[in-house]
């Protein structure tokens, strides 16, 4: 149970005040009667008045005051989470992330201005499912959802350097958006209008945008194009390390590349689908015009965010209060039959009818949670976090309060803290809230590159809510990232194993060389010993004969030594040559691997 207006519990102080007032009045009346004269005579004159009845009436009135004071605090019970439905459209935002969007003819750049204006547009949406196609030469997609904060986070950190292929393929972006909307239509979104909001400088380099627009028109999908940039052209910045500008892009002839707004192409695409074209410049971006165009489209109901709903309990306090008040009005102080009080009872009933109709004139929207939700809707995550902190302090065991605080922390990119809050929110009893908490927990793990934990969280969310398409999409993405991470670790391990193997091979070779050298040294030593022994045996012979014999021995031994050493030396030289050539071979192999890549487009801006 909770109280909507706990500050109104101060009205309960009226109960002891009323008891004190009745006690003072009773004592004053007794003193006044004592001053009238003979007590026995006065006792006989007031015998018709019943003191117990007077006390009972006073007690009834005090109890009525207590019930009304507690009812005004508006107690609520039976908390349960539900998905609130709102009417909306299906919108896919196709945002150009090519290098030409870094041009600064619109402050601070075409891309940054587009991001800011899109955030402003999404702050005014309610109930619309929004997806994203980020494109350059290829596309990156984010599935449609009503979690606008998640969509903002997806594009907020993206830059042209994150795109796998350069260029501007508007046709591929429109095709990807059309496929995304087609899947939504197959899931049951046929009755609502579907829109592609295309934001680009319109200078297509390698796709067929008009053909893609015709396919969208066949499905009834409207394209609203926003052309960003100047008609005269602007130099395209070259992006260096850390996404910092490093000069301007030049073509193959060494001339600077300029990017011009192709309004004719965008206007034709919008016209083919029955949409509209708007031009953004440094002073006007056209968000208001986009909102006006979207306002006239057909909307249907869709699931949005989780809402915690409570049952009102104050009616159960007002009803007994009314009955007790009627009983007090009908109860007379005298023992004889009382006069009819129907009119008085009817008047009291009429005074309490507004309260029974769930109308509370003292109600004020001052709850911390409501204030936080309003701040989040306005994009003020810092203010929302301050309000949610108050809510968590007041309701430390409330899973919904931790869930809301986690959303605010996630919007501020404080993912570690957000993960802790979502982990607490997974203790919720309501399956819907629990599934949403696991889904958001998976998002925080994904942002922290903890893909294995993210996969486990997404699977728990899907177990609780199998229809959560966003969780399915993110699970596939996390599995892909995990696969890439494992492959990278495996390649690193192979490289390390190869280095270790090369070291071991070199050590073994060194050992073999040392053994061969020891063997040669021993062989030489044996020969020298034999030579000394022969010299001693031949000392008695003639010196000339000895010299001849020694000369003959030397002539016989020298070729033999040369023959013995030559194979070993040749083997050692071969090993050294192989060791010298292996790093070169390895570098050649790496160069071949680097060369096996997709050829860049003719125009990568």
Image: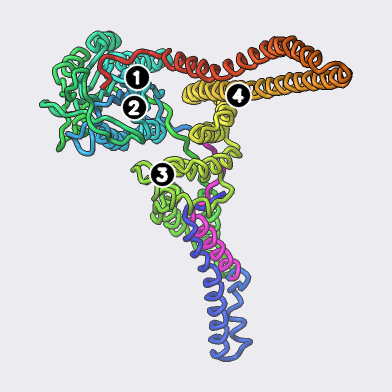
Q: Is residue 578 left or right of residue 565?
A: left
Q: Which disc, if any, is residue 88?
A: 2
Asked if one can make out residue 311 in the rendered structure from this viewpoint, the answer is: no
The segment highlighted magenta reads: 55-81
Between discs 2 and 1, the one toward the N terminus: 2
Nearest the eye: 350 or 387 = 387
Residue at the spot of label 1: 165
Residue at the spot of label 3: 373
Between discs 3 and 2, the one toward the N terminus: 2
Q: CA distance from mark 2 to mark 1?
A: 34 Å
Instruction: Please say if the residues under marks 4 and 3 sit with CB atoms less than 8 Å apart.
Output: no
Instruction: Please say if the residues under marks 2 and 1 sit with CB atoms less than 8 Å apart.
Output: no
Q: Which disc, if any, is residue 499?
A: 4
User: Residue shown at 48%/22% (left/top)?
Assistant: 473
Label 3, secondary structure: give it.
helix
Between discs 4 and 2, the one toward the N terminus: 2
Residue 374 in the image, given as x and y percentages of width and height: 37, 45
Instruction: Please say if the residues under marks 3 and 2 sit with CB atoms less than 8 Å apart.
Output: no
Q: CA distance from mark 1 to mark 3?
A: 40 Å
**Is 265 drawn above or below residue 423 in the view shown?**
above
User: Residue shown at 70%/10% (left/top)?
Assistant: 559
Nearest the eye: 219 or 256 = 256
Instruction: Please say if the residues under marks 1 and 4 sit with CB atoms less than 8 Å apart.
Output: no
Asked if one can make out residue 148 in the rendered structure from this viewpoint, the answer is: yes
């Amino acid at each position: 149970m909770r109280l909507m207006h706990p500050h109104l519990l101060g009205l309960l102080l009226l109960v002891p005040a009323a008891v004190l007032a009745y006690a003072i009045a009773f004592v004053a009346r007794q003193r006044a009667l004592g001053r009238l004269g003979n007590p026995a005579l006065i006792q006989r004159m007031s015998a018709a008045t019943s003191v117990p009845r007077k006390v009972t009436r006073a007690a009834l009135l005090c109890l009525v005051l207590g019930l009304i004071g507690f009812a005004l605090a508006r107690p609520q019970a039976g908390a349960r989470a539900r998905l609130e439905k709102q009417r909306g459209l299906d919108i896919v935002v196709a945002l150009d992330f090519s290098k030409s969007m870094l041009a600064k003819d619109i402050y601070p750049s075409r891309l940054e201005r587009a991001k800011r204006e899109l955030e402003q547009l999404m702050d005014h949406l309610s109930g619309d499912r929004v997806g994203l196609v980020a494109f350059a030469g290829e596309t990156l997609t984010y599935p449609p959802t009503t979690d606008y904060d998640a969509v903002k986070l997806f594009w907020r950190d993206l830059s042209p350097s994150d795109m796998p292929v350069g260029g501007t393929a508007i046709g591929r972006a429109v095709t990807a958006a059309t496929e995304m909307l087609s899947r939504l239509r197959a899931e049951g979104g046929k009755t609502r209008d579907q829109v592609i909001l295309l934001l680009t400088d319109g200078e297509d380099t390698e796709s067929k945008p008009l053909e893609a627009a015709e396919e969208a028109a066949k499905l009834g999908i409207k394209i609203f194009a926003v052309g960003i940039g100047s008609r005269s052209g602007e130099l395209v910045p070259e992006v260096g390390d850390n996404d910092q500008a490093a000069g301007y892009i030049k073509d193959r002839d060494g001339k600077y590349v300029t990017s011009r707004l192709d309004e004719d192409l965008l206007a034709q695409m919008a016209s083919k689908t029955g949409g509209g074209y708007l031009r953004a410049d440094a002073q006007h971006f056209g968000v208001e015009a986009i909102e006006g165009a979207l306002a006239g489209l057909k909307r249907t109901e869709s699931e949005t965010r989780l809402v915690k709903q409570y049952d009102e309990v104050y009616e159960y306090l007002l009803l007994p209060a009314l009955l007790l008040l009627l009983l007090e009005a009908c109860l007379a102080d005298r023992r004889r039959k009382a006069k009819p009080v129907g009119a008085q009872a009817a008047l009291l009933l009429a005074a309490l009818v507004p309260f029974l109709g769930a109308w509370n004139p003292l109600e004020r929207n001052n709850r911390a949670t409501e204030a936080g939700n309003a701040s989040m809707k306005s994009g003020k995550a810092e203010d929302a976090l301050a309000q949610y902190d108050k809510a968590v302090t007041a309701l430390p065991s409330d899973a919904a309060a931790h869930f809301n605080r986690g959303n605010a922390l996630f919007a501020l990119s404080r993912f570690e803290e957000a993960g802790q809050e979502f982990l607490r929110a997974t203790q919720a009893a309501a399956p819907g809230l629990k599934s949403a908490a696991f889904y958001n927990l998976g998002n925080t793990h994904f942002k922290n590159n903890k893909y294995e934990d993210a996969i486990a969280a997404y699977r728990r969310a899907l177990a609780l809510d199998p229809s959560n398409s966003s969780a399915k999409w993110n699970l596939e993405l996390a599995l892909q990232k995990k696969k890439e991470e494992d492959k990278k670790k495996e390649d690193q391990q192979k490289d390390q194993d190869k280095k270790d193997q090369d070291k071991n091979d070199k050590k073994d070779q060194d050992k073999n060389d040392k053994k061969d050298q020891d063997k040669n040294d021993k062989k030489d030593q044996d020969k020298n010993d034999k030579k000394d022994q022969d010299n001693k045996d031949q000392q008695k012979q003639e010196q000339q004969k000895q010299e001849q014999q020694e000369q003959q021995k030397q002539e016989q031994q020298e070729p033999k030594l040369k023959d013995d050493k030559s194979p070993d030396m040749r083997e050692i030289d071969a090993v050294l040559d192989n060791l010298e050539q292996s790093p070169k071979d390895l570098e050649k192999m790496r160069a071949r691997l680097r060369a096996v890549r997709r050829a860049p487009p003719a125009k990568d801006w």
